[in-house]
Image (spheres, rainbow, N blue to C red):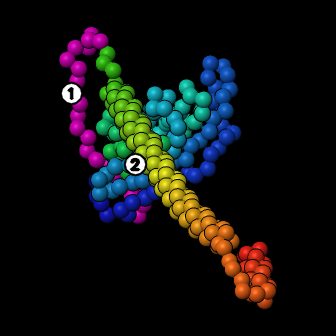
Amino acid sequence: MESNTEPITTETSNELVPETSTETDGEQINTLEPNYGCTIRFIKRVLIVNVTLHKIPPKFVNLDPTETEFYLDTLGFSKKYKLRFSYPQDIQVDVDESEAELEYGILKVTFPITQIRDKKSGKLLRKKRRKRKAAADDNSPAKKPKTELNMERQLEIISEINSEQNKKIEESLQKEAEKNAYLANTERNKSNKKAKQKRQKEQVLDSILKKQQEQTDQEQELENKKATAASRRKVTFNNEVEVQEFHTKAKIRTNRKKKN
């Protein structure tokens, strides 16, 4: 095959078609056409078909392509897809050597190209295929087609990959939960520590205020004792004028105490 054509050609269908009907066991089933895209890589001589199959388990994907036509359905699942189309540019592929993988809801199928029509010249470009060996014994039991074996094994591998991914996701969620629990515990300890410090601070302030009040009470008691001692002190007067002055001063002191 020559490589004088364009390096990459892509055809994509982006709309679902809900009107397609499929007859299964005498019943009409409405199916959807999933989003898909075709990519031709001339250097590697392969045709890549990408099909969007979100939340479709691999075991329900029925992939049955031919040399000239792509076919896929999920009629065994609740979300029923069906896709059938001919390869662009009269392409023929080697189905036996095809590879399929399903990751993050995207099915990627890679076919080796055995024939393609050149867009510029219009000529069919073919790749020489190796002759297969004839069966040694015609009476030997028919072997299962290699394509079917490949597809089944590939779907098993896809299922294993999905299981590993689910396991990794569960481990990640568990680590995230442990991290959140640790952060919550740390925050709770910080709050308890702040509350404890606040209580201790309040206790210290109460102790200081209590001591100040005790000191004030002691000073007041001492003043009262001095005043009582002064009132009991004997006083002698030489004349009536001194008596009047004494009483006047006593009234003034009494008024001051009342005001205070």
Disc nearer the start of the sequence (1/2) = 2
Q: Nearer the viewer, mark 1 or mark 2?
A: 2
How far apart, in angstroms, are the residues tagged by discs 1 and 2? 28 Å
Asked if the residue at tag 2 contacts the one at tag 1, i.e. Cβ–Cβ closer than 8 Å, the answer is no
Q: Which residues are magenta?
A: 117-141
The reply to whether residue 226 is visible in this rendering is yes
Q: Position of residue 115 (x, y in %)?
A: 35, 47
Which residue does the numbered mark 2 point to in the structure image? 48
Q: Is residue 64 magenta?
A: no
Q: Is residue 125 magenta?
A: yes
108 lies left or right of 139: right
Residue 173 versus residue 36: which sits nearer the camera?
173
- Residue reaching furthest top? 139
Which residue does the numbered mark 1 point to in the structure image? 133
The type of residue carrying mark 2 is Ile
Q: Quadrant of the C terminus?
A: bottom right
Residue 195 versus residue 63: which sits nearer the camera?
195
> The residue tagged with tag 2: helix, strand or loop?
strand
> The residue tagged with tag 1: helix, strand or loop?
loop
The type of residue carrying mark 1 is Lys
Q: Position of residue 52 (x, y in %)?
A: 51, 44
Residue 111 drawn above or below residue 123: above
Residue 69 drawn above or below residue 44: above
